[in-house]
Structure formats: C-alpha cells, structure tokens
Image (cartoon, rainbow, N blue to C red):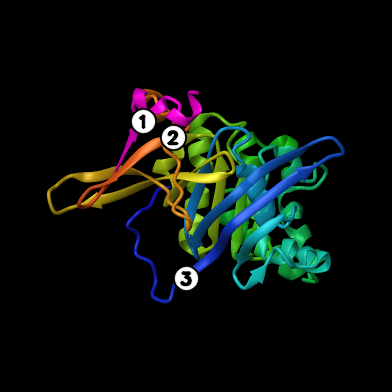
C-alpha cells in the first residue's frame, strides 16, 4: 500500500471494511478460490490502488465492491451497507447511486451513438432528474475533466484518454461516494495515463470521493495515497510513502508485509527463493523484531521413530 501524509479530516473513519473475505467460483467440475480470507480497510476520502498479478484476486474484489458479484463468506461493508447480506434489489440501488465504475475497455463505459454530454446525462435521467438538472451537472462534470469544449462529440470522435475522462464523468454523474476503476489506463500510453490519473486525483481532492483503482502498474505508487499488493487472494504487502522534513530526506518509500488478524503474513517470493525457505521456517523473537530463517538441513531429516 502507499500512504501520503495528506491530513485526514477529523471524524474520518473506515469506509470500506473487508474481514476474512472469501470468494469461491464454482462450476460443475471445478472450484476456484479467488479470495482467501482477505482483510482490507479503506478510509473515507482516500485514493488508493490495488496491484497484483493476474489471478491474484484484485478484479474479483473490485467486482464485489461494485455490487457486480457477491462474496462467499466473511464480512464486507461499504459505509453502513453489508454487501454480504444485501438483496439484489438493494444492490441495484447501490450500483446506481452509491458507486461509480470505470472499465478498462472504453467501449464498455460509453454509449457510442450519444454525445459526451448525453452519456453523462443518462444516469441522472434514469434516477429521475429533469433534463435541465442533468444538463447542468453534466456540463459541470465535463468542465472538471477538461472536456467541456467536446461535449457534443461522440466517443468515436474522442481519443482513448478523452473517452476515459468522459467515463469518469459518467461514473460520477449521480454523485456516488465511491469511485472504482478497473485498469482504467490499460489501453493508454504513459502520457495519456498520467492525464487520466490527474483527473482522478483532482476529483478526489475536490469532492472527497473515495477512489479505488485496480492495476498491474507498480508505477501507480507515485500517483495515489496508498497501494495494496495482493497475492493468492490475500493482501500481501503495503508501500508507504511519506515526506520527512526533519532531516531533509525528502520523499521516503518503505514497503511492509501485511499481517492479518490471525497473525499471518506473506513473505515476498523473491525473499523466499533467496533464503531457500521451503514448507517450514524457524522463527525467533528478538527484543523488537521477529527473525525468519530457513530450517537447517539436519532438521529436514525424518524423526528417529520414522527411520525404522
């Protein structure tokens, strides 16, 4: 995870709370465990990212947060809403007014035969706003994302980055407190990606919307408040970034292993390989630390009672 030292308003509290979360995908012949007891907390108004390799469970988690999928077990709260017990009817309301979603594929975000402004207006009209109300807010959002001059352009007349900026405006049309994005810059070049991330940051700072971005890109650490790394269906590490003025160090980046409620942590794979740690490791408690060492060769021998 990555953490800025941005001041948190008094009274801020956990907005997303996942505890021992499981998701099992079942077919007739196979069960795939996508989430394996995941723990995660996200503060209200935070802008954070989730990174991990394909199959780590990050997109599954995002789909559950979006109300597009349901967990198999555990606890998951967004605000005061329990997504584990929410009915399908309540999930529809949740998806319409409490969460905005930006897909990687620009074609999934926008209706191709509508203009940029009309695309932003549609969610509001479906929620009962008048056309005049929808028009005013659509123009306001398009101005924030820097596309008010292209409000009459259809998606095919916009670049990929412009389409994603319109998609962000669409996701925020009904003023949801949570904005989710699944690889929103995956089809963009680095310069255009920076522009899109700048829009996310600007909206986060202007409106206080909580932003969660899923990505493969580890460079996201310099663009968000916090980065959570996932591996094998669990959170595995955090990257914390802070600024130290005391000794003139400037920006300092540190990486930590995540310890869950049961005391489990994931040792980075490269460390496991470097130390030759197998199925077991030796732990010893120091004055202010825990040492992890591979078992010695003689310890791998079978016990005497099994050598007969």
Location of residue 34 by image quarter: top right
The local crowd at label 1, few if under 14, some if 14 to 19, many if 20 or more residues have their Cα within 10 Å, is some
**Residue 102 pos. (x, y %):** 66, 48
The local crowd at label 2, few if under 14, some if 14 to 19, many if 20 or more residues have their Cα within 10 Å, is few
Of 307 and 16, which appears nearest the observer?
307
Mark with earlier residue (1, 2): 2
Which label number is shown at residue 280? 2
Magenta span: 291-308
Membership of 163 in magenta stretch: no
Furthest-bottom residue in this view: 11
Which label number is shown at residue 295? 1
Which label number is shown at residue 137? none
Location of residue 173 by image quarter: bottom right
Check disc 2 and report its element: helix, strand or loop. Answer: loop
Of 187 and 42, which appears nearest the observer?
42
**Residue 303 pos. (x, y %):** 44, 30
Which label number is shown at residue 13? 3
Residue 169 in sight: yes
Mark with earlier residue (2, 3): 3
Measure how far apart labels 1 and 3 are at the Cα level.
42 Å
- Residue at position x 53%, y 55% from top? 39
């Amino acid at each position: 995870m990555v953490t800025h030292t941005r001041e948190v308003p008094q009274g801020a509290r956990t907005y997303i709370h996942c505890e021992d979360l499981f998701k099992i995908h079942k077919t007739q012949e196979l069960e795939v465990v996508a989430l394996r007891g995941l723990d995660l907390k996200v503060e209200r108004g935070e802008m954070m990212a989730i990174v991990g390799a394909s199959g780590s469970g990050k997109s599954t988690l995002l789909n559950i947060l979006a109300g597009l999928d349901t967990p198999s077990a555990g606890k998951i709260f967004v605000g005061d809403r329990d997504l584990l017990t929410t009915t399908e009817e309540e999930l529809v309301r949740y998806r319409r007014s409490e969460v905005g979603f930006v897909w990687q594929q620009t074609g999934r975000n926008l209706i191709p035969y509508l203009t940029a402004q009309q695309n932003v207006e549609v969610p509001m009209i479906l929620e009962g706003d008048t056309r005049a109300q929808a028009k005013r807010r659509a123009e306001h959002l398009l101005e924030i994302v820097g596309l008010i001059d292209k409000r009459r352009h259809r998606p095919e007349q916009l670049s990929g980055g412009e389409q994603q900026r319109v998609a962000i405006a669409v996701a925020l049309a009904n003023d949801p407190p949570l904005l989710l994005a699944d690889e929103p810059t995956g089809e963009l070049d680095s310069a255009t990606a920076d522009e899109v991330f700048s829009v996310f940051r600007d909206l986060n700072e202007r409106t206080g919307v909580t932003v969660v971005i899923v990505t493969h890109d580890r460079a996201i650490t310099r663009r968000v408040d916090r980065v959570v790394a996932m591996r094998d269906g669990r959170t595995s590490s955090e990257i914390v970034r802070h600024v130290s003025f005391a000794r003139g160090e400037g920006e300092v980046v540190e990486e930590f292993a995540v310890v869950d409620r049961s005391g489990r942590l994931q040792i980075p794979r490269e460390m496991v390989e470097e130390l030759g740690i197998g199925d077991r490791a030796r732990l010893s408690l120091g004055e202010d630390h825990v040492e992890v060492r591979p078992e010695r060769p003689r310890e791998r021998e079978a016990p005497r009672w099994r050598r007969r």
